[in-house]
Amino acid sequence: MEDGVEIYSKSSGKKITGDYILQIADNGYFLLEKKADLRKIYLELTAKCNLDCITCIRHSWERNPGHMDFTLFKKILNQLEKMPKCKEIVLGGFGEPLLHPRIEKIIASLKKRGYQVKITTNGMLLEKELIDTLISWQVDEIIVSVDSFEEELFADIRRQGQLSKVRKNLLNLKERKLEKETTFPRVALEFVLMEKNKEELASLSKHARELGVFSILVTHLLPYQEEMKEQILYSKGEGEQQIALKFWASPVKGSATMCTMNLPSPNWGAERSCDFVSNKACTVTWQGEVSSCYALMHPNRYYIFGREKNVAAHSFGNLQRESLFEIWNSPAYLKFRNRVRYFDYPSCVDCELSDNCTYPEENQDCWGNDPSCADCLWSQNIIRCP
């Protein structure tokens, strides 16, 4: 037992032994057992990108992005052996993973060890040679960000990108999958919903059928620039999650017959929960910093219901110096996950004192939490990640 406290069973009177952390909270005492129960990891192979999207976190960064060193990747891969329940690897983060110079080697290394591999991408680099690699290694899913299917609007939102090229790449992928008679990699679309593109929502399933898409994840906009504040479509009122708005026939013969488009919650006010914690997931930056979620990976500034919010990066350890098991089971990370599991935070967005409170501006709260999840839009299913 850590924290210098001995715990005894109330029923037997015997001392409780084992690898536990004691957490004292307002609603009781918690014994948090150290476990190798990580199930999902988001690997940021790079923080570099070939686009300059108006929705991107880079507009609030003061960092020089880089690629994950391949030596660090191999170290992480070896450490995952001590996390046998971890089956899913998402190559994502805040960069374009297909830019990594060793991307094909990384994919091969993961698939050889039997991991489910998902890749988030802007679709610009899905060239024919890479497509064949993705198919040959049976990558599980490619999530492609497309925020408009109108050339002019696409160019305005996803600057330096070309809709025609993304469409061509996805059609090539669809064709090669048909030739190989495979459903893998499945293709999903991610669509950031805002004032600019809201009229396109009704036509997304039509484009999805054409491009061989199995699902669409719609998320709301998180404004990283002040001029984007007026583009949000969610409010502080009560709302509930909307899912499976549309269904369409599977684009690949012999595969599942139904595909879906899922919508985010339109309002703040639902019961809060964290997908990262409930799915036993963590994120790793290109530098090896382990964080709890996308929101805390890098220092950034964004606007929540018009208010400026400054978020400091929060790392529970670095994989260049510590093992994944040690970081995952550190007292700080165990206690953090337990607090989030019970969502032991105030609700800052609808607090009657919010107009005069400055805690949320630095991602803190009046209960002493730092960092705080008290106004997390992910917890309300307003902002969403694959």
Image (spheres, rainbow, N blue to C red):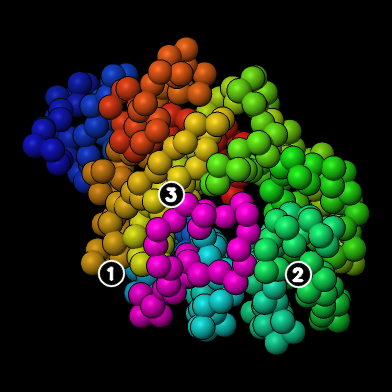
> In the displayed structure, would residue 358 be above or below residue 172?
above
- Mark 1: amino acid: Gln
Residue tagged 2: 162
The circle on residue 320 is 1
Q: Is residue 63 magenta?
A: yes
Residue farthest to the left, as pictured:
4
Whether residue 177 appears in this view of the structure is no
Residue 291: image location, x then y, percent: 38, 52
- Sequence-wise, the earlier of marks 2 and 3 is 2
Whether residue 325 appears in this view of the structure is yes
Q: Element under label 3?
A: strand
Residue tagged 3: 300
Residue 323: image location, x then y, percent: 28, 64
- The crowding category of the residue bearing disc 1, from other C-alpha atoms within 10 Å (few below 14, some 14 to 19, many at least 20), is some
Q: Is residue 6 magenta?
A: no
Residue 135: image location, x then y, percent: 71, 78
> In the displayed structure, would residue 153 be above or below residue 45?
above
Q: Report the magenta residues as a range.
A: 44-72
- Mark 3: amino acid: Asn
The residue lying toward the viewer, choosing from 140 and 261, is: 261
**Residue 199 falls in which quadrant of the image?**
top right
The circle on residue 176 is none
- Mark 2: amino acid: Gln
Q: CA distance from mark 1 to mark 3?
A: 23 Å
Q: Residue at left 75%, top 51%?
A: 216
Residue farthest to the front, as pictured:
227
